[in-house]
Structures are given as structure tokens and as C-alpha cells.
Image (cartoon, grey):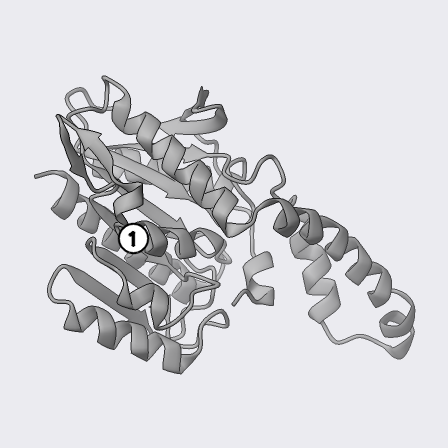
Amino acid sequence: MSCPDCFTGHVHAGTPAGSEITLAGLPTYVSRPQNAGEPKGVVVFIPDIFGWAFANNRLLCDAYAEKGGFVVYLPDLMGGRAPPFELSALIDKIRNPASWTITLLWKPIWVFQAASLLIPFFATNRQSVVLSRIINIITAIRASPDNSALKVGTAGFCWGGKYVFLLAHDKPSSRISVNGSLQPLIDCAFAAHPSMLSVPADVENVRQPMSVAVGDTDMAISTEGIRTMETLLKKKGEDHEVVILDGAKHGFAVRLDPKDELQNKYADVAEKQAIAWFTKWLAK
């Protein structure tokens, strides 16, 4: 499921260092490692609900590129319908305790405003539509001469976390032809605080190497769901891992409060976890 924490958080300081291109018909942010030499691999970044233009997502792409040595693609997978970050302030005002006057007079207005941003998003971004966009763009990336020799991983956050699980199912219909043989669309996946997961189904069907970072009391997935996910992936063997972080809040990897030392620590843990995972599976 999704939760109020899926729509709240903080904007981080910094200027993204990548560039914008059009790929498979979609606006796409690209971040490349600054050091000379062959990249270790490709990472396709599937963002939270605030989408490809959100600065936090782009800054994390830059971190993966610079610290990990990957080419990172962040496409607009939402058809231009990503809610503006102003939605976060609306959700906070709706959730926060208030006087009866504000509750009766203002909160209904804020609910209407939030709904006017969210309903078009969900109406135009059904799972089948988004998954088709993702498959098309990864196929285009793999077909590019610049990337033909590179392995491809995916990183998904909150809204995007669901999709990296689906990609890791490695369904025959999503496979692509590489050098005359059908190969998995992706080589590995990483998810941080995924939302809208169907547990156990989305986890049971994972085939490609999967790494997950999640808080122990994440609002988007129950404690039972987290433990079930951990158990199922452990049964699949060493190609999978789940890191459960005590006290990590939903959104900690992308939209953390910069003043919160614990959440900063966990964001750093998740960043290093993702880079290590991609290095393990893409840099072979």
C-alpha cells in the first residue's frame, strides 16, 4: 500500500550535475561518472512519487554515478504527471493536529487540493502503463551502442520500489535478445522503502538478485510484511538480501530531514548498500 509518508519529506540542497536527454520518447535525466574510463554498468533509477525532476532524486543519481562509477538514467515514467513537491506541505497540514476551526474550514480545502494532484497521477499511471514504459526504456538503453557491453541494474524508491520487484521477476515476456539469445531485461535490483508491494506474491516471484533497505516500522509495509519479505528472500539464497534498519522512517533514502542525524545515517547506509550491490552484480 501507499501511505501519508509517501507524499512528505524534505528538499535537499545541491545542484544536480547531470544532463537531460530524450530516450525512448521520454525526458530522461542522465548522470555519468566524471572519471575517465569505462563505466562499471548502467543503473535505471525508478523514483518516488515526486518523479524525475525532483532534485533529491537527481542528486542521488549523481552520487551513484560519481561514487559507484555507473551511468545512471532517471526517466520520466509518469507521463509528466508527477505531483509538485507542494503536495508534501498539504499532506503535513492535513495530518497535523489543529483547532476545530481549521479542521472544519481549512482541512477539507487542503484535502481537495491534495486529491486534485493525486487523482490525475494515479489515473494516468496504472501499473501496466508504467511497466510498459520501463521495459521500453530499458530495452532502448540496452540497444544503445554505448551500453551494449554493460550490465543493467534498477534502483527503486517508494513508488518505484514496486516496479523493481516486478522487473526482478524476469518474466519471459520481458526478456530481450542479446547477441542472438534471450536475456533477462535487468541483471539485478535494489529497492529502498518500497510501497504498494503485494506480499508475498511480489516477493515470491523474484528471480534476479534483489537487495532491499527498509525501516522496521515503515508505514507502507507492515512489520509482518517486512519479516515475510526477509524470510522469502533468504530462502532464495545469497543472491538476495534485506537490510532492516531500526527506526528508519519511510522515505529515509530520498526525502530525509537533513537535520535528523539518525535518518542521515540510514540514508548513507542505503546509498552504500545500493552501490555495493550494483558493483557486485554489474561490474563483473
Quadrant of the image occupied by residue 221: bottom left
| Residue most extreme to the left | 284
Quadrant of the image occupied by residue 134: top left
**Is there any visible trace of residue 8 in the rendered image?**
no
Residue under the point 80% across and 74% down: 98
User: Label 1 neighbourhood size at 10 Å, few (<14), some (14-19), many (20+)?
Assistant: many
In the displayed structure, 145 sits above or below 172; it is above
In the displayed structure, 260 sits above or below 246; it is above
Residue named by callout 1: 190
In this rendering, position of residue 240 left or right of residue 130: left
In the displayed structure, 90 sits above or below 72; it is below
In the displayed structure, 50 sits above or below 145; it is below
In the rendered image, residue 191, in percent from the top left (x then y), is placed at 34, 56
| Residue most extreme to the front | 173
Quadrant of the image occupied by residue 206: bottom left
Please, what is the three-letter code of the amino acid marked with disc 1?
Answer: Phe
**Is there any visible trace of residue 206 in the rendered image?**
yes
In this rendering, position of residue 271 left or right of residue 161: left
Residue under the point 48% across and 23% down: 25
Residue under the point 18% across and 49% down: 276
In the rendered image, residue 10, in percent from the top left (x then y), is placed at 56, 53
Between residue 257 and residue 115, name the one nearer to us: 115
In this rendering, position of residue 141 left or right of residue 241: right
